[in-house]
Image: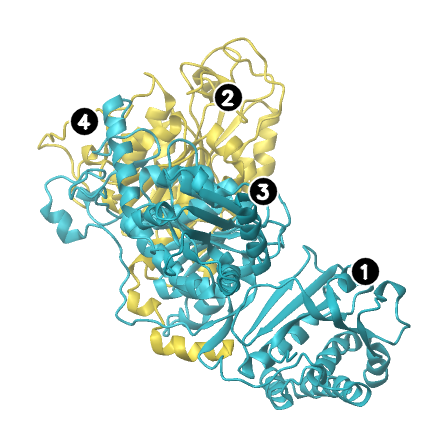
């Protein structure tokens, strides 16, 4: 599990980021997942994204539910507070934590069982609330920890390792998120770090709920012929729609992209996301276009990946509820308690 | 017999007709006359058309428990005539709308009828269906003003206060009062033998419901995050909290909120939000009722095991299942005490009235943070939703929240290594850190097996080590929860033990029993786990009557489990029909047991 600590020895030549940390400083304990697990590749991409953005690890909170994916917060950012909650209920934990302290960067890690079955309701409502969190659904179509049952994201017709065929419709996390009004929807593949890292960075900087579904093959229970979440299937059927590049606010906007194929979207903090249109006529800021495109690719047996949708005018939970800029945990008690004299005065209404 | 300031009456209407404002007016008038008064709103789980009752008890001695015997019935709802007339004592009075002939179901030879053509008069004086219906209610309040000798000056003042910005409404209300008043004065021998006389017994009191008081406690405790899912009878906790926050928690420069209220998709989520917010360092709470607690129990186990503070208000209603959502009970005592799977034990506070609801709400946050664990405050529908006459709330401005053992940046700078679940001080309570404080403060919160260093474990000894410390920690809380209220009388060999809202009925019953020569000591438990004082009270009496409002004698079970006092010493007295307990329930129960023993 998560009990093997990595040695914290740094080679002096390791590159440091803007806050003076090396990539090693963003690591966690050694993974206990199966060798070759897609989730470990996602963890590596997460480490890269945080390091690239020079976010101080202790200013991050990483939360998860239950399942293989939910173990992974132990494997990155050892100096961040972690919370491995109960099955399917991470969205409510992160909602409460975010309500209390809006100055923390929140990352939530979940799986397809955690998000699309037991925790479907919580996911939906966290999306609706537009809680400011990067929410990663590590999607392998299978229950790994309980040894290979189909999850709600298993495609109809896919066959389990034991030879059973899934007859039910799959829930597509991205389509779901789009219909619920998600302000940021992306899909990646654990084996494609080049695509995933910029998308994670954009998600971390997004002011609101950034939903990223990452196809992450289960090497033990769902990487066989008949699975639509296997390495082979995903590599073959992956259609990259939009390539995101993330540009922090400090960096100059370069012009290396052809104007006709790049769309730059400014995020809340002034940083930019460049969405490189690969598919013709694809508009990643139009919810309906995105929805139709994903459906169309699905019909063709393909998986559309990339930053699929980004709302340029996202207002997160705090903006919607008009909370003070100062995190609630920092508001001094003297500002919270009306005091004895006011209590005396107030009680006139109960006379 | 002089029945001034000692009687009860009941008003039967259909809900959604606006009777609440008439009934509130009557209550408040009596209260301002300085006469102790209690009101119990008996309402349906419905918005319009179903029967609803308002019971008012006037008692010069200050007894506030419900009485099920009524001297006067205001029968405004034909749907409940039969039931209502049966609740009148022999020799009582029945006020009915004589616009229509007296219904045969209302006829009883031993009752005096007071017929007033309320509908007819209101139809003449007011226009529009809505106004006519509303004013008919105010008109019966006017009739009662004459019949019970309520102070007309106070009524006028109250209407003035209430409708200061709506003079037209004030005029029509006053007119309706006068219609009823004049008719009663002219046709009946006013006042009735049951009537009011001004006293000075309420000047230092207020009329408030427990949910409002609890919400006020949350504000004064410094709670900033409230998460909830609407449920009767807990909804008004959050509504009141919101109201107070809008008044007191706006940042002056920006008018932005120094609070967050999260209406969750269900109770699973509501408690998750509370745990998340508490974990991040806020004082957070959720108000709910039994069905909500049932849903929350998985998360409550996480908070217990991972040691995250959480404050949960359980405004109890009747169960099991949906039960009767608008009736009161103490059916969640066991559920809350051991909420969640595995070995758990939860801190519980049991207020007996709105004043304690206010005080215990504050205490709940202090205890939750000091012991890093969920704390339940169990009130009930009667305490939560009815207006109680209680001494004014007071506040000590020297109060500072007890945030418990939370390490600051400076403290973390100085520690070599921080271990989340290490019992450094030997009191069972480890130190905790908040996200964002310091790199050295990071730890992994988990509901899975962990050792004292906060590291995942499947090792038997490491697991038991933490589990046993948790037990010790919660046991220490027995000394920190509010101590029981104990009242002894010389030579008493019998004890009476109760909890929460049964208090009012027990106090009255004990006085009546004492007058009959039955000496009984009294103890009201106010917190769980029980302290040694609870055990020694039970041990020092030959027999203890355990008075509570649930079928299964849950308090007695808790006492048996937790104090090892033999169950033979604990005689159960119960009432669980959904109404607040009355003194006669207690007396009948105690006497029945005594007779059986004799």
Q: Are marks 2 and 3 in contact (CB under 8 Å)?
A: no
Expressed as whole percent of the image width and height from the top left, the position of residue B344 reads: 37, 36
Tell me where residue B180 appears, x and y as whole percent: 76, 84
Q: Are marks 3 and 4 in contact (CB under 8 Å)?
A: no
For image coordinates 56% across by 16% down, the residue present is A158
Camera-nearest label, 1 or 4: 1
Q: In front here: B186 or B158?
A: B186
Q: In the image, which lettered chain appears yellow?
A: A
A131 displayed left or right of B172: left
Q: Earlier in the sequence, mark 3 or mark 4?
A: 4
Q: Give the distance between the C-alpha atoms of the residues marked 1 and 4, in whole angstroms.
A: 79 Å
Distance between the alpha carbons at the discs numbered 2 and 3 = 24 Å
Q: Which residue is mark 2?
A: A237
Give how far apart the Cα atoms at labels 3 and 1 are: 55 Å
Q: Chain of mark 1?
A: B
Callout 3 crowding tier (Cα within 10 Å): few <14, some 14–19, many ≥20: few
Residue pointed to by mark 1: B82
Instruction: Give the percent coordinates (x, y) of residue B256.
Output: 41, 67
Mark 1–mark 2 distance (CA, rounded to whole Å) = 75 Å
Toward the viewer: B476 or A284? B476
Q: Which residue is mark 4?
A: A6
Q: Colour of chain B?
A: cyan
Is B345 positioned to the left or the right of A156 in the image? left
Q: Are marks 3 and 1 in contact (CB under 8 Å)?
A: no
Badge 3 element: helix
Q: Number of marks in the image? A: 4
């Amino acid at each position: 599990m998560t009990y093997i600590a990595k040695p914290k020895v740094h080679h002096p030549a390791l590159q440091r980021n803007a806050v003076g940390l090396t990539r090693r400083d963003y690591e966690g304990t050694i993974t206990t997942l199966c060798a070759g697990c897609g989730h470990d590749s996602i963890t590596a991409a997460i480490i890269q994204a945080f390091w690239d953005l020079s976010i101080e690890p202790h200013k991050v909170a990483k939360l998860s539910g239950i399942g293989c994916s939910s173990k992974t917060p132990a494997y990155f950012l050892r100096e961040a507070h972690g919370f491995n909650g109960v099955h399917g209920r991470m969205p409510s934990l992160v909602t409460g934590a975010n309500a209390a302290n809006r100055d923390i960067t929140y990352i939530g890690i979940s799986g397809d069982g955690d998000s699309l079955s037991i925790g479907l309701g919580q996911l939906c409502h966290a999306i609706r609330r537009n809680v400011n969190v990067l929410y990663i659904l590590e999607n392998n179509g299978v229950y790994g920890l309980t040894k290979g049952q189909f999850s709600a994201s298993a495609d109809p017709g896919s066959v389990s390792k034991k030879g059973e065929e899934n007859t039910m419709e799959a829930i597509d996390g991205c389509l779901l998120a789009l219909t619920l009004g998600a302000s940021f929807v992306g899909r990646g593949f654990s084996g494609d770090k080049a695509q995933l890292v910029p998308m994670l960075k954009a998600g971390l900087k997004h002011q609101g709920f950034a939903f990223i579904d990452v196809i992450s093959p289960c090497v033990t229970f769902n990487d066989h012929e008949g699975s639509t979440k296997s390495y082979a299937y995903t590599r073959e059927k992956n259609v990259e729609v939009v390539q995101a590049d993330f540009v922090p606010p400090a960096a100059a906007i370069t012009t290396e992209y052809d104007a006709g194929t790049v769309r730059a979207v400014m995020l809340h903090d002034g940083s930019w996301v460049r969405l490189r249109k690969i598919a013709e006529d694809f508009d990643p800021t139009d919810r309906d276009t995105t929805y139709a495109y994903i459906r169309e690719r699905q019909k063709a047996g393909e998986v559309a990946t990339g930053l699929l949708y980004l709302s340029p005018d996202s207002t997160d939970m705090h903006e919607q509820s008009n909370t003070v800029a100062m995190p609630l945990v920092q508001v001094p008690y003297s500002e919270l308690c009306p005091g004895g004299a006011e209590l005396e005065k107030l009680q006139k209404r109960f006379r | 017999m002089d029945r001034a300031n000692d009687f009860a009456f009941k008003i039967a209407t259909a809900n959604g007709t606006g009777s609440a404002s008439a009934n509130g007016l009557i209550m408040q008038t009596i209260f301002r006359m300085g006469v102790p008064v209690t009101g119990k709103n008996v309402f349906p789980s419905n918005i319009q058309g179903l029967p609803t009752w308002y019971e008012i008890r006037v008692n010069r001695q200050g007894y506030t428990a419900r009485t099920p015997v009524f001297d006067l019935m205001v029968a405004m709802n034909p749907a409940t005539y039969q039931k209502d007339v049966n609740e009148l004592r022999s020799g009582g009075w029945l006020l009915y709308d004589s616009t229509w002939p007296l219904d045969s179901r209302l006829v009883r030879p031993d009752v005096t009828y007071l017929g007033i053509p309320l509908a007819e008069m209101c139809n003449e004086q007011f226009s529009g269906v809505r106004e006519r219906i509303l004013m008919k209610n105010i008109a019966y309040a006017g009739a009662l003003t004459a019949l019970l000798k309520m102070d007309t000056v106070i009524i006028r003042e109250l209407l003035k206060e209430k409708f200061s910005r709506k003079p037209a409404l004030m005029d029509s209300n006053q007119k309706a009062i006068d219609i009823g008043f004049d008719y009663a004065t002219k046709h009946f021998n006013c006042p009735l033998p049951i009537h009011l006389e001004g006293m000075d017994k309420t000047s230092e009191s207020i009329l408030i419901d427990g949910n409002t008081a609890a919400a006020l406690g949350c504000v004064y405790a410094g709670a900033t995050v409230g998460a909830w899912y609407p449920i009767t009878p807990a909804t008004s906790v959050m509504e009141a909290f919101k109201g107070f926050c809008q008044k007191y928690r706006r940042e002056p420069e920006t008018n932005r909120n120094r609070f967050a209220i999260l209406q969750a998709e269900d109770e699973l989520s509501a408690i998750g939000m509370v745990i998340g917010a508490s974990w991040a360092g806020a004082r957070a709470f959720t108000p709910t009722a039994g069905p909500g607690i049932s849903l929350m129990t998985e998360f409550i186990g996480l908070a217990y095991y991972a040691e995250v503070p959480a404050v949960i208000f359980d405004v109890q209603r009747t169960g099991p299942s949906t039960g009767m959502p608008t009736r009161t009970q103490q059916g969640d005592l066991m559920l809350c005490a051991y909420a969640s799977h595995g070995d758990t034990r939860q801190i519980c506070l049991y207020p007996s009235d709105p004043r304690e609801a206010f005080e215990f709400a504050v205490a709940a946050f202090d205890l939750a943070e000091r012991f890093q664990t969920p704390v339940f405050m169990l009130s009930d529908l009667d305490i939560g939703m009815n207006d109680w006459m209680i001494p004014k709330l007071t506040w000590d401005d020297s109060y500072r929240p007890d945030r418990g053992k939370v390490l600051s940046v400076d403290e973390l700078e100085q520690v070599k290594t921080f271990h989340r679940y290490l019992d450094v001080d030997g009191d069972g309570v480890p130190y905790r850190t908040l996200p964002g404080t310091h790199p050295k403060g990071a730890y992994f919160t988990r509901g899975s097996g962990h050792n004292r260093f906060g590291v995942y474990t499947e090792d038997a000894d490491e697991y038991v080590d933490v589990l046993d410390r948790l037990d010790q920690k919660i046991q220490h809380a027995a000394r920190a929860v509010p101590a029981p209220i104990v009242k002894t009388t010389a030579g008493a060999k019998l004890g009476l033990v109760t909890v929460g809202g049964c208090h009012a009925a027990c106090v009255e019953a004990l006085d009546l029993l004492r007058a009959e020569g039955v000496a009984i000591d009294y103890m009201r438990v106010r917190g769980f786990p029980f302290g040694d004082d609870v055990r020694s009270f039970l041990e020092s009496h030959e027999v203890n009557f355990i008075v509570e409002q649930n079928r299964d004698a849950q308090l007695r079970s808790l006492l048996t489990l937790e104090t090892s006092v033999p169950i033979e010493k604990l005689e159960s007295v119960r009432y669980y029909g959904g109404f607040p307990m009355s003194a006669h329930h207690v007396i009948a129960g105690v006497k029945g047991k005594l007779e059986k023993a004799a």
